[in-house]
Image: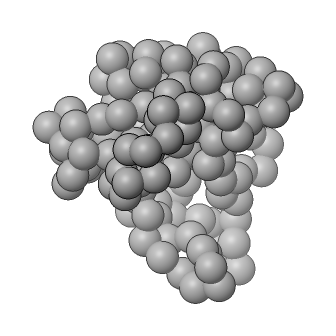
């Protein structure tokens, strides 16, 4: 485990977040570091959300399980499902597992998905586009 603020943008992380009133262990794409939080995009392996909705599917970056060691199944990185994970939480630094950088091909798919995501407003899209353009490997 490492301090969230020490993990580079462009990496996949795993950490505990609160969802639906309970803490859950989830995978995220770390898109950018901000003043007091990391801007992260949720990764899901629940593909049924996109199978019957081509507009929604266009707004996610599809990844096969073979493309990254952190993915245990075919998954989607969702630019429209953003999480601002704080660097500090009660009890100290927010910790996460660095699962390693994504490939340039995956990063490019995240860029394309950001342009097409129907759940992003223009300000969010612009912020995310700038963050993705700043990622360097």
Residue drawn at 70 percent across, 40 percent down:
119
Q: Position of residue 47 (x, y in %)?
A: 36, 51
Residue drawn at 59 percent across, 65 percent down:
94
Position of the N terminus, as image quadrant, is bottom left
Q: In which quadrant of the rendered view does residue 48 lie? A: bottom left
| Above/below status of 94 relative to 8 | below
Return the residue nearer the eye: 13 or 35. Answer: 13
| Above/below status of 49 relative to 62 | below
Q: On the rendered structure, is 10 left or right of 18?
A: left
Q: Residue furthest left?
A: 66
Return the residue nearer the eye: 117 or 32. Answer: 117
Q: On the rendered structure, is 36 left or right of 89?
A: right
Q: In which quadrant of the rendered view does residue 87 lie? A: bottom right
Residue drawn at 43 percent across, 71 percent down:
25
Residue 2 visible here: no
Q: Position of residue 5 (x, y in %)?
A: 59, 48
Q: Residue furthest right?
A: 123
Residue 117 visible here: yes
């Amino acid at each position: 485990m490492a301090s969230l603020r020490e993990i580079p943008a462009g990496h996949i992380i795993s950490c505990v977040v609160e969802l639906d009133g309970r803490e859950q262990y989830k995978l995220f794409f770390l898109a950018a570091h901000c003043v007091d939080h990391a801007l992260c995009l949720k990764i899901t392996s629940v593909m049924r959300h996109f199978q019957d909705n081509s507009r929604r599917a266009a707004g996610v970056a599809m990844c096969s399980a073979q493309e990254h060691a952190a993915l245990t199944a075919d998954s989607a990185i969702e630019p429209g499902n953003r999480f601002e994970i704080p660097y500090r939480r009660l009890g100290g630094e927010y910790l996460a597992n660095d699962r390693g950088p994504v490939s340039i091909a995956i990063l490019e798919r995240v860029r394309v998905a950001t342009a097409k995501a129907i759940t992003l407003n223009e300000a969010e899209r612009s912020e995310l586009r700038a963050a993705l353009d700043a990622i360097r490997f």
